Image (cartoon, helix red, strand yellow):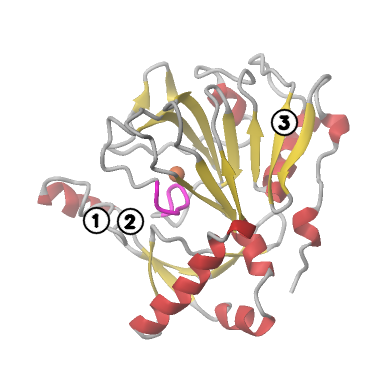
Amino acid sequence: MSTATATLRVVSDSSALPPGARISQIRPVLGSLIQGFRFDGKPLKDDFRAMLRDLLHNRGLVVFEAGTVTAENFTAFAGFLGEFFHYAGPHTPRAPENPDATTIDSVRDTHLRNHIWHADGGFRSDAPAFTALYAHQLPEAGGDTMYSNAAWVHEQLDPLFAAYLDTLSVIQSADATGHITDRYLDADSAAAARQKMPPFEMPLVRVHPVTGRRWIAVNESYVAYIKGVSRVTSQNLLGILFDMIKSPEATVRFTWTQGALAIWDNRVVQHKGIKDYGGGRRVLYRATMTA
Ligand SMILES: [Fe+2]
């Protein structure tokens, strides 16, 4: 079993930061904040781009203060970190001022399920490696986003339990918690969506392709069950893992400011929006990227 040392590794080679920019940890377990950088639309210098990718792989979440990017250019910035991975559904339309961004709007989509822990695109076996979220419009209060580091959680497991989990696989499904059934209003659309996004099997523990860290690849939104065990065993094991993933020790609660940008490693980091808008409107713009 690896130790928490890797988690605490401060990977920032701050010499790669542009002049005036500075970096700090949000929590030891997860997240770095970059301040003092302004994206001018020009390609990033190679060493800065490499540093950002290293941060994403090792710190999981990188937040940029308001003013770093705009609604129009945040996708160009995020696009330097990986190839765009476009997927948009009926509930996540394109942003009006940015064709590379999709919109997550608490008013427009009253069926949003982003308050359930998930990985973006977790209903696909080729889910995107990175997600970028830009805060376009915020309620007066509320609407934070929680993030969890599922690699750190794995490192806390008893070795015998971890070895057992290595033997298991899970069935993931777009409709595991009713994303299709509850959100598509007519039966034909729902049937077509189920056909387009069939359930698939994945190892319960996966290995990060860059860092080599093992991580627990289950989330409350898209994992239907653990294969080959009883329903009760599956539910109880998943309950233990879900509890660990959403524990205070494994998580960061990020409070948005308008214009802030968050980018995270969508493999080891899962997230949920907190649905406490108090009647306000929360509009986030999203882009997703492959590695
Ligand atoms: Fe999400």
The magenta segment is 115-122
Q: Residue at x 50, y 73 (%)?
A: 240
Q: Residues within 10 Å of mark 3 (few under 14, many from 20)?
A: some
Q: Residues within 10 Å of mark 2 (few under 14, many from 20)?
A: many
Residue 105 position within the rendered picture, expressed as x and y whole percent measured from the top left: 35, 31
- Judged from this view, the residue extending furthest toward the top is 40
Label 1–label 2 contact, CB within 8 A: yes
Disc nearest the viewer among 1 and 3: 3
Pick whichever of labels 1 and 2 is earlier in the sequence.
2
The amino acid on which the numbered mark 2 sits, given as a three-letter code, is Ala
- State whether the magenta stretch is mostly helix, strand or loop: loop
Between the C-alphas of marks 3 and 2, the distance is: 34 Å
Residue pointed to by mark 3: 34
Q: Residue at x 31, y 39 (%)?
A: 89
Residue pointed to by mark 1: 194
Between the C-alphas of marks 1 and 3, the distance is: 40 Å
Q: Residue at x 72, y 31 (%)?
A: 34
- Judged from this view, the residue extending furthest toward the right is 15
Q: Residue 185 magenta-drawn? A: no
Cβ of mark 1 under 8 Å from ligand 1: the answer is no
Residue pointed to by mark 2: 174
Viewer can see residue 291: no
